[in-house]
Image (cartoon, rainbow, N blue to C red):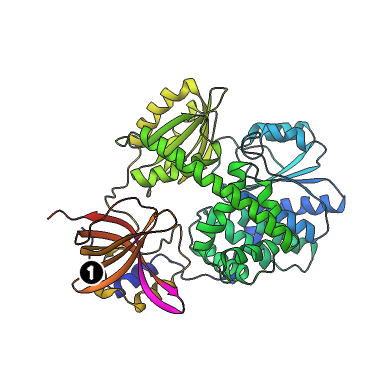
Amino acid sequence: MQSKITLDALELLLKARFKEGFLSLKDLPHPSAFKDMEKATKRIVRAIENREKITIIGDYDVDGVSSTSIMKLFFDEISYPVAWIIPNRFRDGYGLSPNIIPRIKGTDLAITVDNGISAVYAAKLCKEEGIELIITDHHMLAPEVPEAYAIIDQKQASCSFPYEEVCGAQIAWYLIASLKNALNMKINMMPYMELAAIAIIADVMPLQHINRAMVIAGLDALSKSNRPAIKAYREQIQKEVLTSEDIAFGLAPILNAAGRMEDASHAVDFLSSTNIYDARVRLERLIEFNTLRKATEEEITQKALKKADRDAPVILVEGKGWHEGVVGIVAARVARICEKPCIVLSENEEGILKGSGRSYGELDLFGIVDGCRMHLEKFGGHKAAIGLSLQKNSLKAFREQVLISSLAIKQPKETNDPEIIGELHFSEISFSLTQMIQKYEPYGQGNPRPKFITSEVEILQADSMGKEGEHMRFSFVQDGIVMQGVKFKTKASFNVGEKVEISYTVNENTFRGNVTLQLMVDKIKSIQI
């Protein structure tokens, strides 16, 4: 049973999320707080002075694409030519892998961004080829760490950087800030902050401490940006001011789609566009990838749900030839629907299973699968999201070990959605509520938008909306107070006059200059009378 919530109680709960208060850019730690930052900076400066060949190696998600773009655009700005590679998900696998070593032969200095901390064998191959290696990454360290000239990763035990949850693009941003200082150049860091903000949101970093400060500054910069790619995106969605939701549900999936469906270099090319005409054409291409991604993802989600054992503590499903590019999103959708962590694997023609896992609530999926490494070929990630691969003949043992490991890990006792703040009566829903909620924006990971629950609500009206009737519009009434609501992506049917319990967030809806309050409905549960 949820406790009743008042405006004052809500404010105290939201305030408690920010133990350091609201930080600003002046609170950003110095780049030298990162272990090996100064060592890496000096080595890159030496490479520039000696005209060495530098290659940037990124990753195919939004964080990797943003990190690669930050590095590429910085070197463009200082007029130093660098090569860059984003491994292809299907041909090369993840990050700095042995598969890409032949492509970087002749490189003097390789710099990874958003990857590399688990590339032990590839790092050895670099050494054999005479390629010096700087690793910048933010993922957890495996028991064995690659041999490299410098490793910048805040999760190293000996790193004094005070914030553990930062993404790869933030570390890339810090690296170019350190380089700018070492090169004694006047460079505006805000255009790079735009790209870091996109990655922080897309990589679901907690929107607290410096992450919040960087996202607020980055969103402000994005809304004023002259970068052709950002101008083309604002033009596409017909919005001047971008919010964290515009990034999370709009731009991030579009940038991600290139790497999921074909090749992430398309996304770097888009972000690096030098004129609006190129940017528009490249954006259209990314939107086409995203449309294809949505259809593919929907098809595999339905197949995965049919195979899911909903009683298992961790759902583990596999399918032959499932599109590797969407298994992560499918895992997230199945986890949300079944309210359990989920791992989705795709079997290729060689009998290798590759896939992704997504957690649910506060459960540490990385911790669970970390205890199953003996059955895996590759494994990496963090508490909420993992990537893995294994031989088909290891699947049975892996499945059994996941069960043992998940039972050994203490499960958080959460019967309710952890994002629900409390029970709210319709009489408490007002512009004072939404204005107070706006004070604690941007919302996202670690700072979820306040969600409420209201019981004893009657449905006055329920109509389908959207091109294919995939969404629903409602009128609800409680004790004579009527509220309008919207529920996206639902095929369920609801009866007028039905008594329900609803969970929702509240937003201000502007239509033709008129601002009204609207409930963004998450779940509707019938009340048995």
The N terminus: image quadrant = bottom left
Q: Bounds of the magenta span?
A: 509-521
The quarter of the displayed image where residue 118 is located: top right
Residue at x-position 79% and y-position 49%: 82
Residue ranking furthest to the top: 393
Q: Is residue 171 above or below residue 388?
A: below
Report the side of 45 relative to 123 (left or right): right
The residue tagged with tag 1: helix, strand or loop?
A: strand
Report the side of 274 relative to 223 (left or right): right
Count all numbered tags in the image, as a single digit.
Answer: 1
Residue at x-position 45% and y-position 64%: 443
Q: Per the image, is 517 magenta?
A: yes
Residue ranking furthest to the left: 529
User: Visible in this render: residue 389?
Assistant: yes
Residue at x-position 76% and y-position 31%: 128
Residue 512 image offset from top left, x and y in percent: 46, 77
The quarter of the displayed image where residue 72 is located: bottom right
Residue at x-position 54% and y-position 22%: 351
Residue 180 image offset from top left, x and y in percent: 75, 62
Q: Is residue 484 above or below residue 498?
A: below
Q: Nearer the viewer, residue 130 or 307?
A: 307
Residue 529 image offset from top left, x and y in percent: 12, 55
Q: Is residue 135 above or below residue 71?
A: above
User: Visible in this render: residue 366?
Assistant: no
Q: Per the image, is 266 magenta?
A: no
Residue 166 image offset from top left, x and y in percent: 55, 55
As shown in the figure, which amino acid type bears the numbered disc 1?
Val
Q: Is residue 157 above or below residue 181?
A: above
Q: Most prominent secondary structure in the magenta stretch?
A: strand
> How many residues crowd around disc 1 within 10 Å: few (fewer than 14), some, or many (20 or more)?
some
Report the side of 345 relative to 405 (left or right): right
**Residue wearing tag 1:** 477
